[in-house]
Image (spheres, rainbow, N blue to C red):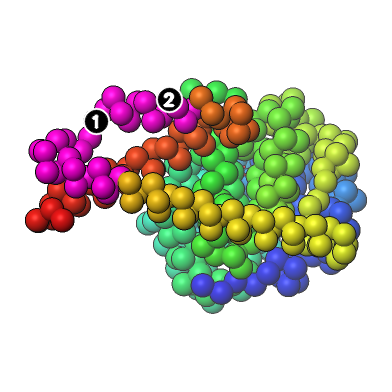
């Protein structure tokens, strides 16, 4: 799939200032004309690239505020005109797409509760054919990378090339710390599979609380995400949706001042020389590690032949527990995390069992 880089979308009058991320901000929901206009005008000078406001809100349970719908669209468009910034809103049906585009909204996003449903995403994709509008696709609520990619493919097939993903975390029962679990490995894998696809992070819906926004947003910048979507509200405590996670315009300014944007590269010679030396060392160590693992598997195969000869079972739980325990005891001294050592020993032992099982199936023993 081909994608247009965010910097070439031609949406925003000026690119983000040096050291500042591409930023989408605005209220979770459009509540009143005044709330939308005040929030948007106050955040406009903070390096915001794109204004957001929820017009239709897919809420988990009925009875929560479900958005004002179409009547709120002109307020968002008016906020765009007043600030000179482009605007975006969530769409979940073809009707939303038509209404938003007719009202003059500049970009659209597909929410997490919509990305889970291929019928809904396809209906939106069909409504987008022939429309050259930028579209952001949030991850589905469940940690299913294929479903996220499927959504991206459907919109791409509709001809949309100004296309980006938004990582907003994954829901779990009884969420421990964050409202939605970041499971960073999923957006990282998405970036590995589609290096050209812009991937933004939405710390608001991951954190669920203002106080946790910074750590999530900074983590995303450390991983070189392409931008952030952060909810802001003129009076967050009184917000009709997501009150605990929205920040005031001042809160947004303070957060942005704290954040450090990371570059992909540097032209500093001392840095370049130093990492070159270290990377050469790492490459050599990787080669040695693989050679050692190869030797280990050779010993494993020899044991395999002996087990076969004497009709001894491949799997010996006592031995497995011993290898695991011995390795875990070395975790601290080698500065490796327990989880890593555990995972590593697991894959090594899995391979050992697979090699010995193959030998059991071979005949005759050499
Ligand atoms: C939102 O951005 O307001 C929203 C509802 O997001 P999500 O789809 O990530 O829950
Ligand atoms: Mn929200």
Q: Is residue 113 visible?
A: no
Q: Position of residue 88 (x, y in %)?
A: 68, 56
Q: Is residue 314 magenta?
A: yes
Q: From the image, tell me which residue sits under label 1.
A: 316
Could you give the CA–CA distance between mark 2 and mark 1, rounded to whole angstroms? 14 Å
- Toward the viewer: 358 or 238? 358
Q: Is residue 340 magenta?
A: no
Q: Secondary structure at mark 2?
A: helix
Q: Determine whether the residue tagged by mark 1 lies in a helix, strand or loop.
A: loop
Q: Nearer the viewer, residue 309 or 8?
A: 309
Q: How many marks?
A: 2
Between 222 and 273, the one nearer to me in the picture: 273
- Within the image, what quadrant is residue 283 found in? bottom right
**Where residue 156 sits: x, y (%)?**
51, 69
In the image, residue 155 sits, relative to residue 112, either above or below, namely: below
Residue plotted at (33% across, 51% down): 298
Q: Position of residue 237 (x, y in %)?
A: 74, 25
Q: Which residues are magenta?
A: 300-328
- Check the image and report above or below for 212 versus 273: above
Q: Is residue 309 left or right of residue 151?
A: left
**Tag shown at residue 325:** 2
């Amino acid at each position: 799939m081909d994608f247009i880089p965010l910097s070439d979308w031609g949406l925003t009058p000026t690119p983000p200032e040096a050291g500042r991320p591409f930023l989408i901000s605005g209220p979770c929901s459009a509540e009143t004309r005044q709330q939308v206009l005040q929030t948007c005008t106050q955040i406009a000078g903070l390096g915001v690239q794109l204004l957001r406001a929820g017009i239709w809100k897919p809420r988990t349970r009925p009875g929560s505020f479900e958005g004002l719908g179409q009547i709120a669209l002109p307020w968002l468009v008016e906020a765009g005109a007043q600030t000179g910034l482009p605007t975006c809103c969530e769409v979940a049906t073809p009707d939303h797409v038509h209404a938003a585009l007719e009202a003059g909204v500049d970009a659209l996003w597909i929410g997490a509760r919509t990305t889970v449903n291929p019928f809904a995403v396809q209906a939106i994709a069909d409504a987008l054919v022939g429309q050259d509008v930028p579209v952001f696709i949030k991850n589905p609520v469940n940690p299913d990378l294929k479903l996220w990619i499927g959504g991206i493919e459907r919109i791409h097939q509709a001809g949309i090339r100004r296309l980006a993903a938004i990582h907003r975390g994954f829901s779990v029962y009884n969420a421990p710390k964050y409202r939605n679990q970041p499971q960073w490995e999923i957006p990282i894998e998405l970036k590995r599979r589609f290096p050209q696809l812009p991937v933004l992070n939405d710390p608001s819906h991951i954190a669920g609380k203002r106080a946790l926004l910074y750590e999530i947003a900074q983590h995303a910048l450390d991983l070189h995400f392409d931008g952030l979507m952060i909810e802001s509200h003129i009076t967050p405590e009184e917000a009709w949706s997501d009150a605990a996670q929205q920040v005031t315009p001042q809160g947004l300014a303070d957060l942005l001042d704290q954040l450090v944007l990371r570059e992909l590269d540097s032209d500093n010679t001392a840095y370049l020389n130093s990492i070159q030396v270290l990377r050469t060392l790492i490459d050599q160590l990787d080669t040695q590690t693989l050679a050692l693992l190869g030797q280990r598997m050779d010993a494993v195969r020899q044991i395999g032949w002996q087990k076969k000869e004497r009709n001894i079972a491949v799997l010996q739980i006592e031995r497995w527990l011993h290898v695991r325990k011995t390795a875990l005891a070395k975790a601290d001294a080698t500065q490796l995390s327990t989880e890593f050592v555990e995972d590593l020993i697991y894959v090594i032992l899995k391979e050992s069992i697979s090699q010995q099982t193959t030998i059991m199936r071979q005949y005759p023993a050499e």
